[in-house]
Amino acid sequence: MDRRSLLTSVLAVAGAGGAGLAAGCGRSSPGTPESLDVLLGESVRASSPMVAAERFFAAKVAELTGNRCRVTVRPGGELGDEQRMAEMLRTGKLAFCKTLLANLTAYDKRLAVASLPYAFTGRDQCLESMRGEFGRRCAAILAEHGLVMLGFFYAGDRNFYNRVRPIHTPADLKGLRIRVPQSIASIDMINALGATAVPLATNDVGSALKQGLVDGAENSVVFYLTEQHLAHAPYFSWSRHQHGVDVLLAGATWLADRPADIRDAIMQAGGLAQEEEIRLWAAATEENTALATGQGSRFNDVDVPAFRAALTKVISAHRGAFGDLAALLPS
């Protein structure tokens, strides 16, 4: 199913009656062109390349609609955590947000499938899968829950960082409290490696590290630097155990209440923002690694076969639970 066909089916379910007004949205009187001022919620800081891509999306929406739809990006968790913003989309209280795909498992546990440890061999395989049938199936699942996937953002390879010691093998994680997204696959992964998984919302990680509530976390080097986690966790270990996939979303009920030309412009802008984010992320990864090194972070490689071996049972158990969606992952 292509993007236009998927959108048509979602809107048919949502109905033209929709949710009316979304946060910051105004509608003109009958017979005059609609004018919209809407918000896009984001949990990461404004310095992230994801926010740059979202502002690119906002500019494209304005351009493609002749300034009839104006999007303001609100980063830093200003509108709440990712799960709260997703629910605001579903109820029509917010037009757009971006979230880690695995944070949407409250709607369907299969959405954690991209976070299965070592699901992809690398960046290129992850991108190819998301651009193909695997990505289309994820979009279809989201559509069943009133969320329209405008595009995906590549969130980089995820790695361990902590305040205590370098991580070379799973044994080095023993006894550490590691923050993870609110995803059962990530929780089971950390516990299987001998650490204690601490599920936290994205915008709570920095304060948890600062207060010593967790010893470390796992994420991309871009997130590590832009969120300034290196100030509390100087040891960064290249485990590359997952490849992060975020999704740029619109609420189906909100989108259904828009004129067809504005809906089309938003979908087109989402596709353009997707490719812009992938470009921006690649440049930021190299730049942020160099910056973090200059600020005192200590980088090291890990014994990847040892991590794979330690996670064999977790991978097998969760791959079975993801059913038809897991079957679309690279073998």
Image: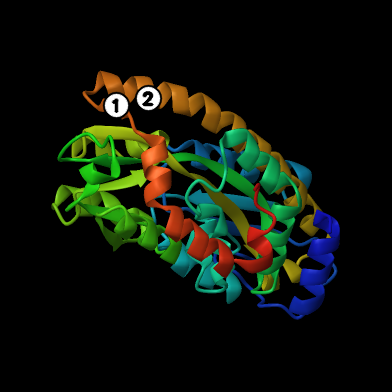
Residue 285, above or below 193: above
As rendered, which of 119 and 45 lies closer to the eye?
Answer: 119
Counting the numbered discs, the total is 2
Whether tag 2 and tag 1 are in contact, CB under 8 A, the answer is: yes
Mark 2 or mark 1: name the one nearer the start of the chain: 2
Q: Which quarter of the picture shows residue 141? A: bottom right
As rendered, which of 221 and 49 lies closer to the eye?
Answer: 221
Q: Is residue 84 visible?
A: yes
Secondary structure of residue under mark 1: strand
Q: Is residue 62 visible?
A: no
The image position of residue 280, as x and y in percent, is: 56, 30
Q: Which residue is mark 1?
A: 299
Tell me if mark 1 has few (under 14), some (14-19) or many (20+) residues whose alpha carbon lies within 10 angstroms of its own.
some
Secondary structure of residue under mark 2: helix
Q: For marks 2 and 1, give the CA distance.
A: 9 Å
The image position of residue 3, as x and y in percent, is: 80, 55
Q: Is residue 138 left or right of residue 122?
A: right
The image position of residue 39, as x and y in percent, is: 55, 57
* Discs 2/1, front: 1
Question: Which dot marks residue 289?
Answer: 2
Amino acid type shown at disc 1: Phe
As rendered, which of 273 and 235 lies closer to the eye?
Answer: 235
Residue at the image point whose x is 64% and y is 68% from the top: 323
Q: Which quarter of the picture shows residue 229? A: top left
